[in-house]
Image (cartoon, rainbow, N blue to C red):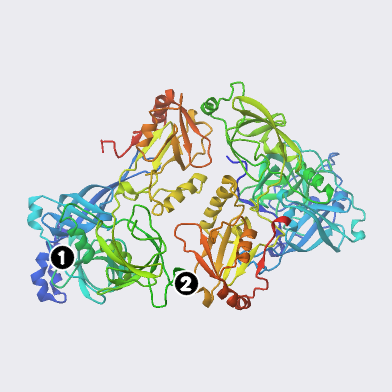
Amino acid sequence: MRRLATAVIGLTLLLAAPAGPAAAKDEDLAPKLRAALVRLHVTTQSYERTAPWKLGNEYTRSGRGVVVGDGLILTKSSHVMNQRMIEIATANSARRYPGKLRHVDRRVGLALIEFDDPNLKKALGPLPLGEPVKLDDEFEIHYLGRDNIPERTNARVIRAIAGSTGLDLQLRASLSDSGDGQVALSKEGKIVGLVTSTYGSRQQATILSIETIRQYMEDFEDDGYHGRPGPGFWTHQLLRGDLRTYYGLADNQHGIAISRVVPGRTGDGVLKENDVLLSVDGYDIDDEGKFVHEVHGRLSSSYLLSGRRYAGDRVKAKVLRDGAEIEVEFELKGQKPGEKRVPDGYGAGRPQFMVIGGLVLLELTSSSGISRSSGGVLLRRFRERANWDPPGKRKRVIYVDRILQDVSNKGFEEVYHQPIKTINGIEINDFEGVPKALETPEGKYHVFRFDGLESDYVIEAAKLDEINKRIADKYKVTRMRYLESDEDE
Amino acid sequence: MPSRTKNLRLLGALAVLLACALLVPAVPALAGPDDEAKAAPPKAAPKPAPAADPSQPDLKKLRASVVKVFTVSQSENYRKPWQRPRPQSSSGSAFYIGDRRLMTNAHVISDAKNLQVKRADRVKRYEARLLYAGHDCDLAVITVDDDEFWEGMVPLEIAERPAMRSKVMTIGYPTGGNKLSVTEGVVSRIEVHTYVHTGADDHLTIQTDAAINPGNSGGPVIQNGKVCGVAFQGRMFAQNLGYMIAPSVIQHFLTDIKDDVYHGYPELGIYMANLRNPTLRKFLGVPEDQDGGMLVLKPVPYASVAGTLKKNDVILKIDGVKIESDGTVKVGDEFLDFAFVVEGKQIGEKVTLTVLRDGKIIDLEVSLKEWAARMKPGRVYDERPEYMVLGGYLFVPLTENYLGWGRSNDLSYYMQQYYRTVVQEGTSREQLVLLSRVLAHPSTRYIRYGDAIVDKVDGVQPKDFAHFVQLIDSSKKDLIKVEFEGVNTAPLILDMKKLRAVHPDILKKYEIAEDRHVQPKEDK
């Protein structure tokens, strides 16, 4: 009964739709558009960071996407965060088909989902990628609304915002707050952006620009995905008179000062601290670190150095050094996840952990909750300096998150958020180092030393298995470790 | 478990704003001068009228010895140190200890600009003045120059520490009325506790269920006619929890001021950890016949044990008294923090620590010193804040008082860093210097800093604020580079010629009468 009712409403609205503006053109486009819009039902499952052996609750959320190739859907990366199952629904249908995550770049904010169901392939077809839109341009935003009925709204570009991951456009558009992943289409029915956030009350929305989408799609065309360059050198704005004097800028010279070149990262060996970056790729940089883009106007120079670039690209730049303007060229270095001392935590999958003699060991990530304890201050410092210091030997920061109380760790109840410096005298530089260090006890003991001013933590080596078993039983710890190198996930 | 931690708790100092007291709508009309027994605060459970108990004091005698203190205080403005905040009126209690001296709490008279006292049996208010203030133990002694005031006053004696559950009586001038108030209760707990006045000092404290309310501060707690404590703080969001300063702390203060100067408590200065873990004990080689002891993590520089104790020493005894594995010593039936043993000692006295080091038990004699770094761990009073206005830049030292004015999370985070740097690492840097803020002026366009910690002045790290000022003053350069701590904080380039040119204009615009207040190290 209910299904029938839905179908009737759907039909009514569908019939009503062509009565909108620009109806003539719509008639040609409508079936093609409908065939490219999908709704995604993604079941996610997160992890309990403070009890990492436990899986979190499952939730199914719905998002939206657009078909961009044969069996390929483009969507927002946040839709597929911690995904366990992806289902795809098409316009005017309640049926769901299985989908699979092909690729995700959380930094850029995009993901690709693939499907191979022949019926779905028959029902869906891709839309082409369009040309850049600029300030004041008008276009439409299309999406599957309630009951998967295609809906659309008008939009106009009000602002361009660029950064190290790409170019976003802010729109005046009447979209509800209830979801995103809607697709922005030109009048010719070409993709010009993907909605990443909506502010219904302000009648505003943000789209990821077609430039950034195209860059993401084209990244797969050669020998594998590169992504954006990683964080490189650090800069200061030079609006202030005192700094302009210090860096020796003439009144007609403009740019930003290079405050630190991180060893091993972009610019290392070419740029020097106290250089002033005057231009990149022929674009002049102003004192605020912005440049004038031919289409989008003033944008952040991080777009030139990272947002519109692939890791591994080379750029030409002009710098002021010791009073002379010189031309330099350098590589925009990528950063693999393993090269970050403090990796991204949010949505990054299962956190690595070990439970050893009641100590719950975690890896410091960008999303670790950090207390104001003495150890928490140290962790926060590690995190603040993550892109400032080169990772060096200490690739990751392993810390005691808390203690599962047991007779064996009496007296250590208050150990909390303490970074571990050594175990059995061996420096702990990543999680793999922990089981390795435990192979060679100091005499009869496993000895944990912390970065902060704390007592050594000791476990009798011969009793470790017994203690672990007792703690596992008492606190129902279903697994005592998960390291990325463990093969079962 | 450091021996000295910043330990702000939900305790409220009890000096009450007079303005607030006046706002209490129904001021109970007390019948007459002999009705103190009825003057208990309205919330207290009805208690039977005091029976003719021979152990109970003569109230008439006490009435003449317990006085009300009226204070107008003006503290400091740490954000605009050239200004003073508006004066505030408050009141507290005090009692006669003989020799024309009244004892009260330091927090009753701190930053006082005007001090008056009034006896319960007189109408007149007498001008009073401060003799000694011990902010670290929240005690003070004041006096009145007018001879008339002292007529008929009987000094109160200081008693021994009262026993648990023994009856006590609080006398003073709490909020809710103007006349002398008496409340009764028992000793509920005896413990070493943080004194909130400075927020950094822990001393013996006696807890009672006799109502102690704002205004009671500085009043005596009486047992058998003698003073067994000075009411001084309470706890918010709890019931019938009043705290008094223990007699040993009072005696320490009185002994200290015998030479007419208050020196304060010595600082032992040990970061330590408990030794309750049997495996850790075995690992450290603590003999099995020992069941107590505390593990030394670090002797703090600028304090007494620096140079005597070493990391991984196990402190077994202090002055021959056994230290338990949780850091307490047994005193009578109570286990008290072992700092209690040092409580009775004055700066310059000695203490013997029995220590297990490298398998041997040795006795180490430690001379007790006061805290010797420019950075103070607690709040200070009756001191002008140090600062320097340089053109549009305000530089200050980072202090607990400064933190009290700004409640930014980042600042308190840096405060923790600051403890690490100054207390734990014990470098030559005794105090951190902040660029507190930048005053808006054409010369400071685009320049924004808030509480930036100065790292270096032309490559030299300032040891303390006075050193920072000296580095700036003595520099002959036209451009001075001030670098800051933290990730990617731009340096500040002080163009001294330009600064000197705009300096008078900024002082005028912001009505800064004095552009600096710097204390040289000597008169610390």
Q: Secondary structure at mark 1?
A: loop
Lower sequence index among marks 1 and 2: 1
- Disc 1 with disc 2 on a shared chain: yes
Q: Amino acid at mark 1?
A: Leu
Q: Which mark is residue B153?
A: none
Instruction: Judge whether residue B297 can be spotted in this image.
Output: yes
Q: Does A285 appear above or below B453? A: below
- Residue to which mark 2 is pinned: A245
Answer with left or right where residue A476 lies relative to residue B53.
Answer: left
Instruction: Judge whether residue B208 can be spotted in this image.
Output: no
Q: From the viewer's side, name the closer residue of B337 and B458.
A: B458
Q: Position of residue B390 (x, y in %)?
A: 60, 70
Q: Does A137 appear above or below A424? A: below
Picture residue at 24% right of the left edge, 61% below the top: A181
Picture residue at 19% right of the left edge, 54% below the top: A112
Whether the residues at callouts 1 and 2 have beta carbons within 8 Å, the answer is: no
Answer with left or right where residue B58 lies relative to residue A178.
Answer: right
Q: Does A356 appear above or below B178? A: above
- Residue to which mark 1 is pinned: A129
Q: Position of residue B84 (x, y in %)?
A: 67, 68
Q: Amino acid at mark 2?
A: Thr
Picture residue at 56% right of the left edge, 25% below the top: B285
